[in-house]
Image (spheres, helix red, strand yellow):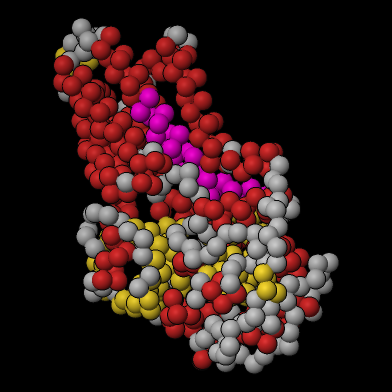
Amino acid sequence: MSSNTSHGEETQSYDNRDLDNAEKGLYDSLRNLPTSTPPVLTDKKPTIHAADATLSKPGKPPTLTKKPDRPKPKISRWVLFNLWFNTYKKFFTFVTLLNLAGIIMAALGRFPYAENHLGALVLGNLLMAVLMRNELFLRCLYIIAIYGLRSWAPLSIKLAATSILQHVGGIHSGCALSGASWLVFKIVDIIKHRATQHDAVLATGIITNAFVITSVLSAFPWVRNTHHNVFERHHRFIGWLGLATTWVFVILGNSYDIKLGQWRTDANTLLSAQELWFAVFMTIFVLIPWLTLREVPVQVEIPSPRVAILRFDRGMQQGLLGRISRTSVMEYHAFGIISEGRKSRYHYMICGVQGDFTKGLVIDPPKTVWTRELKFAGVGHASAMFKRGIRVCTGTGIGAALSTCIQSPDWFLIWIGSDQEKTFGPTITGLIYNHIPPERMILWDTKKRGGRPDTIQLLKDTWTSFRAEVIFITSNMQGNDEMMQGCRAAGIHAFGTLWDF
């Protein structure tokens, strides 16, 4: 995600005559709401014409007077620790320590189940890792949470459920690493008893081990974040090879009777093996997203050299993300989906120019792209659980945030960016003005205002005035950390962008 904002602690004074129309309407509305904190800005509410699709009022730029820099507020170590040791890391720690305890007990001969079912422990962990990244399974979890909790559950339960949904990647990572560890333990056990084991079982076990470990290592955050294509090639294709050799390993391992030293011909023995059914379900859940792969037409709008707006047919629910690629199996990239609703004609993706793929969208716009029709849910999808909330974003983060505020009248939009109308063009501008009233949004142009607002104070004021229950943040790492720290210190419930996985 990119952001065009500056992240200093600088505030300005403004000439109210030149405020954005949306901001004027917002603060006029905020004055009418009960609040213990005075609004940031006040002015008379102007007349808004949605068809004009403009984010700013023409005229001379506002007069900005810089105030002295204020010291950055000190955040307690306890707040920083809690933000660092989030639910993702808690899941990862719990899963890995639980499996490590099992491996130690098995090595000491105090885990009877492991003696006869090492393969089940391997594949059970790997199946869980696959499930925690499967689009269909995660959509089911969101549906259960949203429709099961929103009408009756207290806020604390909704917040806990949202945190779990956002951080299930910790289970994915923990189970993948644990599965690889159990696989190493199993191969060591086979080598120790190689005198009674067939060479074919040992060979396929070692090959499977190499593929699985390579796939797991390629998904480490440093590799994934700095060498995305390396991650995709190794994690996906070597992972597929690992799945294929797992099948061979399972079939051979369960077909060879080490006591008799011969191959079994009875299919019932294989069909009753836990390992086989773990492998079956792993394969099904790996295949499901790829069975929905389609090459679809796309219209590309380039409002500025920094952004491409992609338009696709059919509407979407809010809070979903989609993966797109120019090829059927290589280099998929995820972007937030903007849509007016499931019955609308189109949905959109905002692709900020960052790497070769997004540069190519601007330089050589495609006529078609490959995508999985089964979209996956981002944490913003959980907004349907809450009565009222705030969606704050910077730069191209509007792509992940806008649908929520368009489709729900109970969500407030704060968008901080540079020269938004010129950068993102009339399509995004029109979507904002046609569907979000001025009393439900703040559009902050850092170029016109000479910098970003006091974001934390702005969030506090809006939180109180709008009577929000939760804030969802989509920003770059620096902006996300600043807002999450400020919200946590102020006792405001907030969920930000993750870089753990």
Q: Position of residue 422 (x, y in %)?
A: 45, 80
Q: Main secondary structure of the magenta part?
A: helix
The part of the image, by quadrant, that contains residue 47 is: bottom right
Magenta extent: 156-181
| Quarter of the image that includes the C terminus | top left
Q: Relative to 301, is 391 on the left or the right?
A: right
Q: Nearer the viewer, residue 222 or 272?
A: 222
Q: Residue at x 23, y 43 (%)?
A: 237
Q: Residue at x 32, y 46 (%)?
A: 227
Question: Would you place residue 88 above or below residue 196 in this image?
Answer: below
Check if residue 179 falls in the magenta segment: yes
Q: Relative to 239, is 497 on the left or the right?
A: right
The part of the image, by quadrant, that contains residue 26 is: bottom right
Q: Residue at x 83, y 66 (%)?
A: 36
Q: Nearer the viewer, residue 337 or 480?
A: 480
Q: Relative to 154, is 217 on the left or the right?
A: left
Check if residue 266 falls in the magenta segment: no
Question: Would you place residue 318 above or below residue 275 in this image?
Answer: below
Q: Position of residue 136 (x, y in %)?
A: 41, 54
Question: Would you place residue 457 above or below residue 154 in this image?
Answer: below
Q: Residue at x 53, y 74 (%)?
A: 447
Answer whether residue 300 is visible to the viewer in this image.
yes
Q: Position of residue 497 (x, y in %)?
A: 52, 53
